[in-house]
Amino acid sequence: MKLTVVGYWHGFPESKEATSGYLLEADGFRLLLDCGSGVISNLQRYTELNQLDAVVLSHYHHDHAADVKVLHYHRILRHYGEGQERPLTIYGHNEDRESFAALGYEGFVDHFPIDDTKPFTIGPFTFTFVKTDHPVPCYGMKVEHETGSFFYTADSSYIEKLAEAGQDVDLFICECSLYAGTDGSHIGHMNSTEAGKLAEKANANELLLTHLPHTGDHGQLRTEAAEEFTGPVHVARRGWTRKWN
Ligand SMILES: [Zn+2]
């Protein structure tokens, strides 16, 4: 299994970059985890768009789902241009029926509701979804493959059930929208101290901070999280990669 960070910015992308998007590859299957603004442009640095098999969305805020419509257009143009493409399914929750219905595009892109009551198989991966604490319904997820595992918090304020859901993973991917000392609980986001604390409670091997703020020095986020987490702390960058063999 291989994970590549396509985008990691909070809210909007910096120039030539993207908000949340992660490419997951294993056994010839390619899955995009979240599809924020700028993701479809930047994803092409790492794979051809028509090689994509599935998209999984944590929630429908624009910094996680804005480029879904752009992906629809790609499928339509490819269809009429070359008439040959792999089927694509977009997975998301069905608690916001209008947003869920908009994931599909008749005849071009399928959509399928996620289920958080039991492990969920997509290609070679097993997903276990857990609801986070965010102003709209949002799901974090543990992803397992025969080579390893990771947990992705998506967007959330600090809640310990995310540590339980991500117990003993190889990599804990935690949103880190704020610097230490800033309380994000009322907006459904975490700071660096909370990210470190959550990864430590999860007993994860490594921590990747993502969904990063547009201010300050991201190196400071690493230092702050490392005060709570005893393993290696990484800060997301476009193209950051983790490979499991
Ligand atoms: Zn977000």
Image: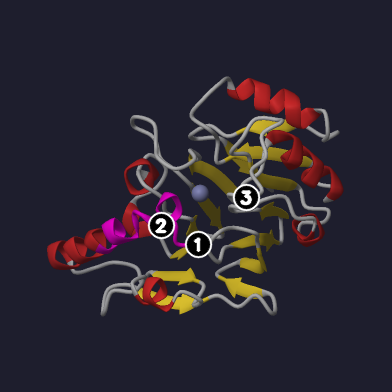
Mark 2 Cα within 10 Å, few/some/many (few <14, many 20+)?
Answer: many
Q: Quick one: SS at disc 3?
A: loop
Q: Locate residue 227: give its quadrant.
A: top right
Horizontal relation, residue 207 to residue 24: left or right: right
Q: Earlier in the sequence, mark 3 or mark 1?
A: 1
Q: Taking 98 as reference, is 164 above or below it?
A: above
What residue appears at the point 61 percent right and 47 percent down from the top-left corner? 189
Kind of residue indicated by mark 2: Ala
Percent from the top left, x then y, of residue 230? 86, 33
- The dot on residue 240 is none
- Circles 3 and 2, Cβ within 8 Å, touching? The answer is no
Percent from the top left, x then y, of residue 105? 28, 74
In the depicted view, which residue is nearer to us: 112 or 25? 112
Kind of residue indicated by mark 3: His
Q: Nearer the viewer, mark 3 or mark 2?
A: 3
Q: Which residue is mark 3?
A: 186
Kind of residue indicated by mark 1: His
- Circles 1 and 2, Cβ within 8 Å, touching? The answer is yes
Q: Taking 209 as reference, is 94 above or below it?
A: below
- Circles 3 and 1, Cβ within 8 Å, touching? The answer is no
What residue appears at the point 75 percent right and 35 percent down from the top-left corner? 193
Percent from the top left, x then y, of residue 85? 29, 66
Percent from the top left, x then y, of residue 171? 72, 46
Q: Which residues are magenta?
A: 59-72
Query: Could you give the CA–CA distance between mark 3 and mark 2, rounded to whole angstroms?
Result: 22 Å
In the depicted view, which residue is nearer to us: 202 or 107? 202
Q: Quick one: SS at disc 1?
A: loop
Q: Which residue is mark 2?
A: 65
Q: Which residue is mark 1?
A: 59
What residue appears at the point 24 percent right and 58 percent down from the top-left corner? 74
